[in-house]
Image: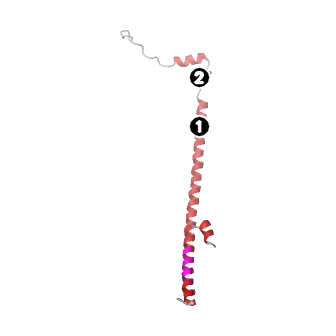
Amino acid sequence: MSQEWLAKYGQPNISVINDRVSSEFKVLLSDLYAGKITYGEFAKSREVIIGKANSDAQAAYQQNRTYEDQRRQQYEQNVLQQRALRNQEEAVNNQLLLNTMKQPNLDYLPAQEQTLDKTLEPELPQETKGAKKR
């Protein structure tokens, strides 16, 4: 796996592990070529590096999986909330429509019925005889 590909498409925590393994391996290789360690020491150290990288990668994989599961659950929850909101809005709109259909429109009533409605309204008190008009 190339560094460029991993940096572009891989998970950041996996890229960090890959970079660490690569640099540790290069240090070991340079020590081997310089004669500071034997090939047996190189092989043992390489196995330690690979073992640690594998366990770190498994932990990172599990962490990424948990994060993705949480994101997916959050997304699904948001979708359900949006659906519920749309359903509520639709119910309110339907109720408003029903309410407007139930209210009588006095503009279309004959004049006689309109006057009957007005006669049922309470009369306002008249001014007293001694009150001054302005």
Query: Foreground residue, 102 or 89?
Result: 89
Tag 2 residue: 106
Mark 1 nearby-residue class (10 Å; few <14, some 14–19, many ≥20): few
Q: Which residue lies furthest to the top in this view?
A: 129
Query: Foreground residue, 65 or 33?
Result: 33
The answer to whether mark 2 and mark 1 are in CB contact below 8 A is no
Hey, what amino acid is under mark 2?
A: Leu
- SS class of the residue under badge 2? helix
Q: Residue at x 62, y 18 (%)?
A: 110
Which label number is shown at residue 95? 1
Indicate yes or no whether the magenta region holds residue 80.
no
- SS class of the residue under badge 1? helix
Q: Magenta region: which residues? A: 19-29
Q: Which colour style is shown?
A: secondary structure
Query: Foreground residue, 102 or 35?
Result: 35
Hey, what amino acid is under mark 1?
A: Gln
Mark 2 nearby-residue class (10 Å; few <14, some 14–19, many ≥20): few
Please provide percent x and percent y for residue 115.
56, 16
Please provide percent x and percent y for residue 119.
52, 16
